[in-house]
């Protein structure tokens, strides 16, 4: 049994990496900037497919440009029943 214990060790990562290099790594960004043209088809497909993961983000805040906001408001007014 004693030989089996000696074979297993805890892996702490690459030994060549210096501790200072680990401290210099930046954390993953909390936000990502990307063109709407890349994300809209994916979101539209997720909505049309009724993907449940969309509900996980229902309360998330997003930032949009003021001109897009104005277009969305106008569109929202246009699609209302009786408008």
Image (cartoon, rainbow, N blue to C red):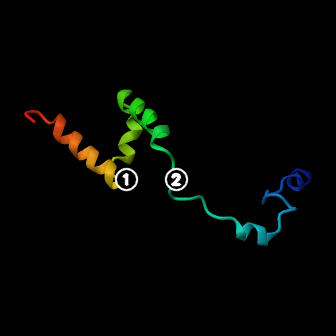
| Closer to us: 41 or 30 | 41
Tell me the CA gap for discs 1 and 2. Answer: 13 Å
State the residue at coordinates (51%, 47%): 34
Along the polypeptide, which appears first: circle 1 or circle 2?
Answer: 2
**x then y, percent, for residue 73:** 23, 46
In the displayed structure, 27 sits above or below 46; it is: below
| Closer to us: 76 or 8 | 76
Left or right, residue 61 beside residue 10? left
State the residue at coordinates (86%, 54%): 5
Please identify, in this view, whether the residue under mark 1 or under mark 2 is nearer the observer: 1
Residue farthest to the left? 82
In the displayed structure, 6 sits above or below 44; it is: below
Residue 56 position by quadrant: top left
Left or right, residue 75 beside residue 23? left
Left or right, residue 63 beside residue 79? right
Residue farthest to the front? 67
In the displayed structure, 39 sits above or below 60; it is: above
Left or right, residue 13 beside residue 76? right
**x then y, percent, for residue 2:** 90, 55
State the residue at coordinates (7%, 33%): 82
**x then y, percent, for residue 33:** 51, 52
Binning the other alpha carbons within 10 Å of mark 2 as few (below 14), some (14 to 19) or many (20 upward) gives few
Q: Which label is found at residue 64?
A: 1
**x then y, percent, for residue 9:** 83, 56
Kindly identify which residue carries mark 2. 32
Q: Which label is found at residue 13?
A: none
Dot 1: element: loop
Residue 10 position by quadrant: bottom right
């Amino acid at each position: 049994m004693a030989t089996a214990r000696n074979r297993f060790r805890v892996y702490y990562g690459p030994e060549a990496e210096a501790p200072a290099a680990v401290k210099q790594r930046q954390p993953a960004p909390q936000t990502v900037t990307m063109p709407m043209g890349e994300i809209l088809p994916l979101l539209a497909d997720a909505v049309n497919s009724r993907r449940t993961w969309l509900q996980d983000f229902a309360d998330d805040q997003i930032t949009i440009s003021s001109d897009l906001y104005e277009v969305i408001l106008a569109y929202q007014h246009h699609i209302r029943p009786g408008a």
